[in-house]
Image (cartoon, rainbow, N blue to C red):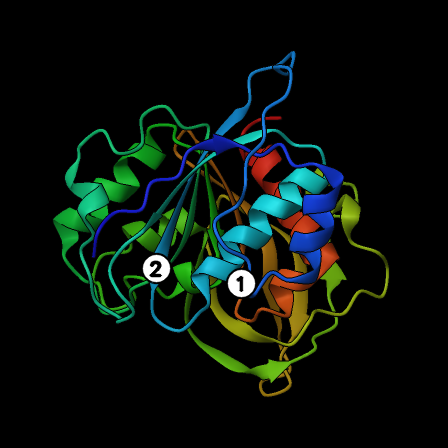
């Protein structure tokens, strides 16, 4: 599948914001208008997406709009490769400098059956050396078939399965963390899957949990991880378009992007 590269600063007028907010699903390519240059350099964000099971075009547009609504100037590069299956080795990572020039890389891909160790390490090594990241939902099950743990250590959690879709109450465990400032008390997720967390890695700080209806255990749903020199923010929520229409989730996701970028 061909690479889709879209690099732009998100500067929308108010009419376009209203139209996009009302019609994510039918929206076409985001329209970009220009205005005076911001005083500070825009964040450079690479979004890697594609694979099984989710509406990645909708999710990408939702992230872009959420950042714009919070007034965060971002230059987005979006790479959607690998088709819609569970196994792919995408062209992006064939470039040994795939990560250069970005403040944050967002992993929102879903390739559970890809298990090539050299390929996986070509992704994790730059993060260990200092490339900051955000990991969303099925990124936790990506490379699930691999025998090595490099990807799971990078994520900060190990997960291989999920519970049914439901609206899960979210318990914030680090109320003073800047990522969680948008989550109100008593918040309940949109309809989404709860991922079962088998292991929380040593450098991971759990920010919030949700309780499984099946095993009755609390499972991390928002967290941070220090992977070598790289800062990682993660969430297991993000399956449904309902979640990517939920303002609390989107604001928290944008907070996580900013935190990962050191902002």
Question: Is 10 on the left or on the right of 79, as rendered?
Answer: right
Whether residue 144 is visible:
yes
Instruction: State the SS at label 1.
Output: loop
**Which numbered marker is on residue 62?**
none
Between 193 and 22, which is closer to the camera in this rendering?
22
Q: Which residue is pictured at 27% across the width and 62% down the height?
A: 143
Q: Residue furthest bottom?
A: 214
Element carrying mark 2 = strand
- In the image, residue 214 sits, relative to residue 194, either above or below, namely below
Q: In the visual, does 162 lie left or right of 153? A: right
Please give the residue where the numbered disc 1 appears in the rendered image: 236
Q: Residues within 10 Å of mark 2 (few under 14, many from 20)?
A: many
Q: Where is residue 113 shown, x and y percent of the image?
A: 23, 69
Q: Residue lying furthest top in this view?
A: 39
Residue 254, percent from left and from top: 63, 43
Q: Report which quarter residue 256 is drawn in.
A: top right
Question: Which quadrant of the figure contains the N terminus?
Answer: bottom left
Is 108 above or below relative to 213? Answer: above
Q: Which residue is mark 2?
A: 50
Residue 205 visible in the picture: no
Percent across and percent down for residue 5 are 33, 40
- Residue at 61% x, 29% y: name it: 73
Q: Earlier in the sequence, mark 2 or mark 1?
A: 2
Residue at 29% x, 69% y is 84
């Amino acid at each position: 599948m061909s690479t889709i590269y879209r690099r732009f600063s998100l500067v929308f007028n108010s009419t376009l914001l209203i139209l996009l907010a009302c019609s994510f699903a039918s929206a076409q390519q985001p329209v970009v208008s220009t205005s005076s240059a911001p005083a500070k350099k825009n964040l450079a964000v690479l979004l890697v997406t594609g694979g099984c099971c989710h509406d990645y075009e909708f999710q990408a547009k939702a992230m872009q709009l959420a950042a714009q609504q919070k007034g965060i100037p971002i230059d987005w590069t979006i790479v959607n490769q690998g088709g819609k299956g569970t196994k792919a080795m995408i062209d992006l990572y064939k470039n040994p400098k795939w990560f250069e020039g970005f403040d944050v890389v967002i992993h929102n891909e879903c390739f559970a059956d890809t298990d090539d160790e050299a390929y996986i390490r070509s992704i994790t090594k730059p993060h260990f050396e200092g490339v900051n990241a955000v990991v969303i939902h099925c990124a936790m099950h990506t490379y699930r078939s691999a025998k090595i743990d490099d990807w799971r250590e990078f994520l900060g959690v190990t997960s291989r399965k999920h519970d049914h879709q439901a609206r899960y109450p979210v318990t914030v465990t680090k109320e003073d963390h800047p990522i969680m400032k948008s989550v109100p008390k008593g918040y309940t997720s949109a309809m989404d899957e709860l991922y079962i967390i088998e292991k929380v890695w040593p450098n991971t700080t759990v920010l919030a949990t949700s309780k499984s209806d099946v095993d009755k255990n609390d499972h991390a749903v928002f967290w941070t991880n220090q992977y070598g020199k790289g800062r990682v923010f993660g969430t297991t929520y993000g399956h449904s378009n309902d979640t990517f229409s939920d303002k609390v989730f989107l604001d928290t996701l944008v907070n996580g992007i900013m935190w990962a970028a050191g902002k």
